[in-house]
Each structure stands twice: as structure tokens, then as C-alpha cells.
Image (cartoon, helix red, strand yellow):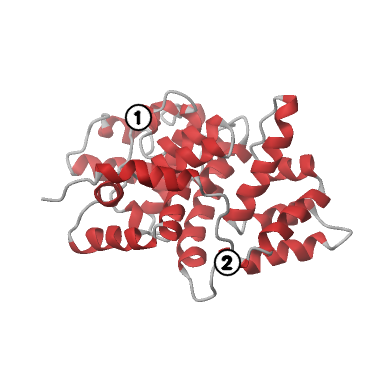
Amino acid sequence: MLEEKTTNRENILKIVSRISELPYDYDAVNDVLYLLKDSNANFIRLAKTIQRDHSLFIKILIEANSSANTTLQKVYTIERAISILGLDNVEKIVMEIIKNDPMKIQDSDSWYRNIFWRHSVFVANTARSISEDLNYKQPGDSFTAGFLHDIGVFIIHYFFSNEYLEIKDLVEHSEVPFMKAEKIVLGTDHLEIAGNLIKKWNLPGEIKDAVVNHRNPSDCSEGLILSSVIHLSDFITYWIGINRNLWDNDLQFDENIISILKLNDHKINEQIPFAVHDIVRDILLSRSRNGKNNFHSHTQANHFQ
């Protein structure tokens, strides 16, 4: 019988606590540096280019939140971070990262660009779009939470590569759900790893809550709306088959987000694109047919017809 390596958890989290630099995509970071050399740099284009690399994105947010501490103001978005730091400081951060050659993601490594980044950015953009439709207070917060929602998987893949292969083998050959496989191999999972890092990075607590709870948002005590938006965005990405990945093989839809986000409210319904209506309706009807009807799926589904 497969058992969790609970004794590993403390050691794994100690290693995580010592992580100071993340692997980066040289081409993406170099493109940011090129833009910064332009005296007429466009902030919008600069922000979008920074969003091509998780390492740079996180580093800039960390520095901006450190700078903002004197005003007790948390920084949620990369656009706000750029405005606080200024272009000169952003350039210094880029230069610091790009000189760290050992952390450069190799050109032969397609996992980051073709699997992880694509999934992250699709969830992030979907989350921002849904937040705008719901008149959520800050759609940019949703982009950031969506972009970082699986950062724990990134950490496992690059800092615990042998363990990642063990996890992958369990999922593919023993049909163990990914998060269960993480617990078996590591004694922890990517959600706990992400939560520890985001806390260490001093990023906003609401972002941390959304990342840690995006699989089961109704269990979240704080940041309930943001967690639910990220969950819906993640599940939509999974449901329509865009960049399906190993770690979402056991993703379950939390039907409580229907009431949390008031998706069964007629006024809200009018604001949500038909594509989202159709996807949520299909998810609920499919779960009803499979007997997973913990939230009155038939009743809720009728609101989307």
C-alpha cells in the first residue's frame, strides 16, 4: 500500500524556505530589458512582457511590496508595481535576474513555456475577464492570483525534479491523483508549498488565500470571492481542454461557487458571457448525470439554460 512520506514534509518545507531565486526564461526577460532601453517604453506593453516570466513577475511584486510597506499599501498587480518602483529600479531587477545564469531555463526545456506558462496565463486572463463581468473590485488582482495559482507545481518541477518524476510516474502508471501522489512522495503538496512561499515573499494575503484555496474555495475563510473566481477560471480551462496538465487530473468542481459568485442571480447572469454560461451549465449537468449532485445541480443548471 502506498503511504505518505510524512517525515519528508518538514525537510521539504525547510528547503522551500531557503529558495531565494527562481528559474527564469531568458528570452522573455531579455525582451523586457530591450523594452526598458527604449526611452518611450510603453507601460502596458512592458507589463505584458513581464507577464511572460514567472520569476521576473514575482521578483518585481516582491520589491514593490517591500517598498510599499512604509505606506501600509499592498501591491497586487504588475502595473502598480512598475509605477511604484519606477523604470530604473525595474531595470536593476531585470539585470540582477539575467546575470544569474545557473537559474536560466534551458532552451530544450519546453515544460515551462508550452505547459506551465500557457496554463497559468490562460487561467489568469480568464479570471480577469470573469472579474470584470462580475464587477469585481480589482480585476487585476484576479490576473495575479490566476497567474500564480499553480506556482507550487513550478517549484516542485524545478527544485525537486526527481520527486516530480516519481509523482508523474504514480499518476501515469498507478492512477494516483496528482495531489495524493505529491503527499505520498513529498509529504506535502503544491498548495502548501505555494502558501509558504507567498507568505515569505510578503505578497498580499488575499493572493495567498486564493492560491492556497483555489481547489476548494468554499473552504476559504478569507478572500472567498477571489478564490472562487480562480477556481472557476481553472476549471473552465480544464473543462474545455486547453493545455490540460498532469496536476489537474483530479480537479473537482466546487459547486458552492455558484452561490458565492451569485451566478444563479438573473442580474449577474446578464453580465456573464454566454460561453461561461454554457460551460457552467454543462459542468453541472454532467455532474448530475454522474451522481455528483451535492449542490442541487439540476436546479442550478436551469439558471444557465
Q: Relative to 240, is 133 on the left or the right?
A: right
Amino acid type at image mark 1: Asn
Identified at 74% across, 55% down, the residue is 46
Give the mark count: 2
Q: Are marks 2 and 1 in contact (CB under 8 Å)?
A: no
Q: Quadrant of residue 200?
A: top right
Q: CA distance from mark 2 to mark 1?
A: 44 Å
125 or 151, nearer to the observer: 151
Viewer-closest of 182 and 271: 182
**What x and y, as percent, mark residue 231?**
42, 40
Q: Is residue 249 above or below residue 273?
A: below
Q: Which x, y percent locates residue 168?
A: 29, 61
Q: Is residue 211 above or below residue 179?
A: above
Residue at 54% x, 54% y: name it: 121
Q: Which residue is mark 1?
A: 256
Q: Residue furthest right?
A: 39
Mark 2: which secondary structure?
A: helix
Q: Is residue 4 left or right of residue 275?
A: left
Circle 2 is placed at which residue position? 102
Q: Quadrant of the C terminus?
A: top left
Foreground label between 2 and 1: 2
19 to the left or right of 30: left
Image point (88%, 58%), residue name: 40
In the rendered structure, which amino acid carries the disc numbered 2?
Pro
